[in-house]
Amino acid sequence: MRYRRSLIDAAEYSIPNGDEFIGLSHLEHGDDFQRDAVVPWPVAPRPFFEEAFGSWLGRVASRYDISVGMLWERSIPSEMPRLGNAGWLIFPPVPDYTLERFARLARLGNNRLEAIQTPIDWTTDRQCVPYCFKCLVLNDADVAAPRWKREWLDPTADRCRVHHTFLETVPASIFRKAGNLADARRAIGRHRNPYKRHDPTRIR
């Protein structure tokens, strides 16, 4: 596939579709996997500093119109961690070598991805997930890139620090069923109830 400009200028890449999004890091010789042979993604959305790791994976998968599971399968030579009932959104912490591989694929520093990891104490099953709809759809850093804030995954979170309003909730199953963040965003639009507030003291 030919790109319009140098591979250095990722913002100007032509974007492959899901069928062309293959062989990102899979160079096999017999049964030996070349773990250090990493071909960077043609386009990789940068993680926002306040974003959750699962949200970033969901945005990358959305960019290529594939699922987070498929993104992982085509990018990482080990099995994806076991996910809870909120699917890829509440993504458990991953090992350093996995972070390093993602960082190389996305042309990032390792510390950028380490900073958005989900604390292990937050990786609990829950019936609903809190969020601020205004913050979700009105990203000050990039209005065209909705993202899920890492702080919303805190089981004790109940208010938006920006708008000083109670957080809304959506069913956790949305993210288990959605392939990526774009799919989840559409589902949230169908399920949204602005009057359903999050109560962190309630067993979810």
Image (cartoon, grey):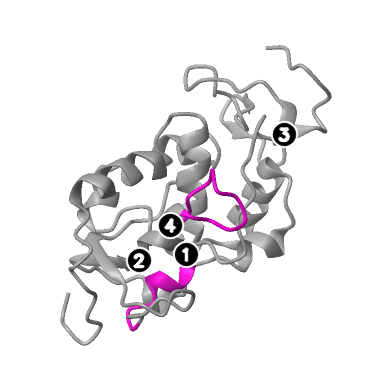
Q: Quadrant of the N terminus?
A: top right
Q: CA distance from mark 3 to mark 2?
A: 29 Å
- Report the residue marked by disc 4: 136
Helix, strand or loop under label 3: helix
Q: Which badge, 3 or 1, is on the more N-terminal residue?
A: 3
Q: Which secondary structure type mostly characterizes the magenta part of the structure?
A: loop
Question: Residue 117 appears at what percent x and percent y?
Answer: 53, 66
Residue 196, placed above or below residue 202: above
- Circle nearer the viewer, 4 or 3: 4
Q: Which badge, 2 or 4, is on the more N-terminal residue?
A: 2
- Report the residue marked by disc 1: 149
Residue 131's tag is 2
Residue 166, placed above or below residue 174: below
**Range of magenta residues:** 138-156
Tags 3 and 2 touching, CB below 8 Å: no
Helix, strand or loop under label 4: helix
Q: CA distance from mark 3 to mark 1?
A: 23 Å
Tags 2 and 4 touching, CB below 8 Å: yes
